[in-house]
Image: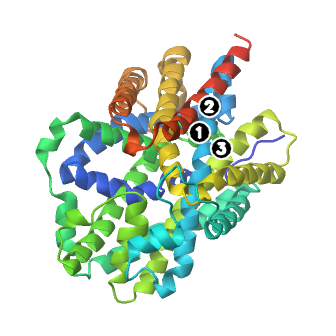
Amino acid sequence: MARDRWKSRTVFLLAAIGSAVGLGNVWRFPYLTYKFGGGAFLIPYLVALFVVGIPLLILEFALGQKIQKGAIGSFKAIHSRFGAIGLMALMSSFIIVAYYAVVMAWSFIYMIASLKVPWASDSKGYFFNNVLQITDGVGNIGGINWMVLLALAAIWILIYFCVWKGTESVGKIVAWTVPLPVILLGILFVRGITLPGFLEGWVYYLRPDWNALLYADVWIAAIGQIFFTLTLAFGVMIAYASFNKEDSDIRSNGWITAITNSSISIFAGFVVFAVLGYMAMKQAVPIADVATSGPGLAFVVFPQALSLMPWAGFFSVVFFVMLLTLGIDSAFSLVEAVDTAILDGKAKWKKQKLAFVVCLAAFLCGIIFTTRAGLYFLDIVDHFVMGYNLVFVGLLQCLAIGWVYGADKMRSYINQHAKVKLGRWWNWAIKVIIPAALIVLLATQFWAEMTTPYEGYPAWALRIGWAVFFVPLMISIAMAVGSTKE
């Protein structure tokens, strides 16, 4: 069966950028910048981008484009046992998309409700009591939240029709869903700079605290943000690159994708803190009292700020449509990575049937996150899969390519079609610098886990999180052991 191809390099870049630019660009990066030294945080962030993010992204693009297969097939071509690396990446991606779609379902609910702005009087109560109907703890599941479940079903129908024809349907979708959230961010930016208090918000966002650069956790946070925001170790970028023509400029593709993603993150920070500055002024409280990250920013603080504006309904619709379009590209890229790996192994499967099976399976796995205790489970699973699974896969990727296949050999392949050649620094990044950084990241995370239970969750709940890491790891090890050693 002939392999799918992107219609053009532009379509590939849109798909890769769409996968990279997600909810974290809006709700995580601005807060990290504010928390870890303001403008000073941009120094470790940019160092991490150039030393860790771009080299590893180029590696994934090169692997997929050279082997012309998804994550499992590409690593298996390096060594029969290394298919297990791709398998662990894809199992982790499947887990992520199962709960990521639930966050999109929340956005969908808010988008529908936006014209009435029902959270105006109590945004926190609306999110936790009306939308999530949350229980008092992870031990009290409380049954299915049917509103969230129905919204989740709608989201999965949408994701299915984005991927059901592979690169053909993805290429058509990203032409709209990648530029649209940037345009909507632009609308919110223009609105933000017309609000009183926006400059104060920007000062809090970017005011440098140079002493922050002396602390290891600032650098670790920067590496972690770069690693996750570029969709590294998910298997997505390998799959997407496998649909490229073999003469595509890999080095240039990596730089364009990474720089665009980071630029959108920084721009989103100006939007977020302009609105938070306005909110702090209206409520006569310090910005520190309203600045937060994650779901709290997207579904409590920002909606509350929007409700204080004229035309609150319109700008709320703009915001939540933006969140949906940011999420949809990342979500279907994870599904496409899984589909690609399966099709590489079982080419007789029809794309539409396979996409339906994968989407249905992820929907069913996501039901646990639609219970009234769903937010607790989502928080635990997200913490472990992001903190351990992906970092571990990234480490294995570097060791496999850098030391077994040969970093210099891969760099020579990359330079065959590169207008600007990739220097020897890339070898050192893949073989030494990135593995060292990821080992520190893993060790720091594990030490924190051993000294303080994450968010004070009970031991049985945290064991679920550890299972999210160890079950894919054990399955991958079993696959490696069962493979014939070359």
Front residue (pair 225, 138): 138
Label 3: state its secondary structure. helix
The type of residue carrying mark 1 is: Ser
Above or below: residue 291 compared with residue 193: above
Q: Residue furthest bottom?
A: 310
The label shown at residue 347 is none
- Within 10 Å of disc 2 (Cα), the crowding (few <14, some 14-19, many 20+) is some
Above or below: residue 178 compared with residue 462: below
Q: Is residue 219 left or right of residue 253?
A: left
Above or below: residue 153 compared with residue 48: below
- Please state the horizontal and vertical placement of residue 199, each as a whole percent of the image: 18, 72
Front residue (pair 338, 168): 338
Q: Quarter-wise, where is residue 349 in the image?
A: top right
Q: Is residue 70 left or right of residue 141?
A: right
- Please state the horizontal and vertical placement of residue 117, each as a whole percent of the image: 45, 84
Q: Quarter-wise, where is residue 452 in the image?
A: top left
State the separation of the CA atoms marked 3 and 1: 11 Å
- Residue located at (59% from left, 39% from top): 92
Label 1: state its secondary structure. helix
Q: Which residue is mark 1?
A: 92
The label shown at residue 337 is 3
Above or below: residue 326 compared with residue 475: below
- Please state the horizontal and vertical placement of residue 121, each as a whole percent of the image: 37, 82
Q: Is residue 178 visible?
A: no
Q: Sequence order check: which comes first, mark 3 or mark 1?
A: 1
State the separation of the CA atoms marked 2 and 1: 7 Å
Q: Residue furthest right?
A: 348
Q: Sequence order check: which comes first, mark 3 or mark 2?
A: 3
Q: Which residue is mark 2?
A: 472
- Within 10 Å of disc 3 (Cα), the crowding (few <14, some 14-19, many 20+) is many
The reply to whether dot 2 and dot 1 touch (C-beta < 8 Å) is yes
Q: Is residue 22 left or right of residue 334?
A: left
